[in-house]
Image (spheres, grey):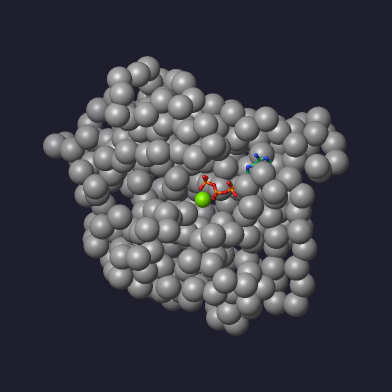
Amino acid sequence: MADIITIGEILIEIMAKNLGQTFEQTGEFIGPYPSGAPAIFIDQAKKAGSSTAIVSKVGNDGFGRLNVARLLQDGVDVQYIGTVADKTTGVAFVTYKENGDRDFIFTIKDSAAACITREDITEAMFDDCKYFHIMGCSAFNEEMIASLKKGINIAREKQVQISFDPNVRKELMENETIKEFLLFALTSCDIFLPGEEELKAITGIENEQEAVEAVLSQQARCVVVKRGDRGCTVYEADSSFDVKPYRTEEIDPTGAGDCFAGTFISLMNQGRSVREAVKYANASGAYAVSRKGPMEGTATLAQLDQFIKERGEQA
Ligand code: ATP
Ligand code: MG
């Protein structure tokens, strides 16, 4: 049985080789790289020292085998990953703009991951589980939303902590079904890990302090607002503190938030203090962006210790 469970898409990523490349023109791409935000999260949570499992689906193809082999190699429990015979593993294509933005093409909705159903979530999975991690990006169809809700309800019943990373584009929050689900997740979670813009969009409150207070007045006991290369801020009921970023060269921003969350929840699960968990999570996000490939930036605590030692004091 795993201490930390997540559910969601397993993907592979094909990335543009050159900055400024677009999908509208023929160009060179590299990959496949193991990807999928929940998969990156669960790989990182395992590397940071907790037992982990992911509920997902892949196709009977090389892309699926590549990803599952990576998770297995890193020690993630892969018993809840099903194989769908007549669907392919989901693919994310990504290009990078000069201003740092990214463009994505996802095949998730037509992929094996879209075959995840609520039947794939069972009460038994949550026996001895400590944290159930959910991500807004996984709410990509109605059955996934039903599956996530089922997981949340079982977790609440079994007093499993719920961590929630919205990880969702603003436009998706305008979809009523998704919005309703995100609000349900927001009011159900114990730990909330939004980006600055996500916090505003999801709560509908412009002022960060007020938005955080609204979240903390519900179930949540801890909110960490992620700010990319400006670090993050931790909020609890009656205290808050800023965490400065580590200096790093940003090679590939994809996966920073997932690694941050994986390390944070893994250390919380191991009974570390919020301060210590966020110190390593902050290093984990910075480490992730310094590596090319979404899951290539996952790291063990020993690797993060070394990274922290090399970077010295935070910027
Ligand atoms: P994702 O693109 O994976 O969804 P996110 O938007 O959820 O990312 P970010 O805020 O980009 O999350 O990154 C998470 C954390 O990683 C930041 O709060 C910070 O601690 C660290 N981090 C990210 N980018 C950098 C950077 N360029 N330099 C230093 N630290 C970084
Ligand atoms: Mg994110």
Residue located at (26% from left, 52% from top): 116
Camera-nearest residue between 277 and 135: 135
Q: Quadrant of residue 283?
A: top right
Q: Is residue 113 visible?
A: yes
Note whether 168 is above or below 35 in the view shown: below
Residue 49: percent from left, percent from top? 62, 44
Residue located at (63% from left, 77% from top): 210
12 left or right of 113 in image: right
Q: Find the residue positioned furthest to the right.
A: 313
Residue 67: percent from left, percent from top? 39, 32
Residue 73: percent from left, percent from top? 48, 30
Residue located at (60% from left, 36% from top): 288
Residue 155: percent from left, percent from top? 44, 69
Note whether 124 is above or below 9 in the view shown: below
Residue located at (63% from left, 32% from top): 250
> How many numbered discs sit on the rendered protein?
0
Q: Is residue 74 visible?
A: no
196 left or right of 278 in image: left
Q: Find the residue positioned furthest to the left.
A: 86
Q: Find the residue positioned furthest to the bottom.
A: 217
Ligand number 1: quarter of image: top right
Q: Quadrant of residue 135?
A: bottom left
Question: Quadrant where the C terminus lies?
Answer: top right
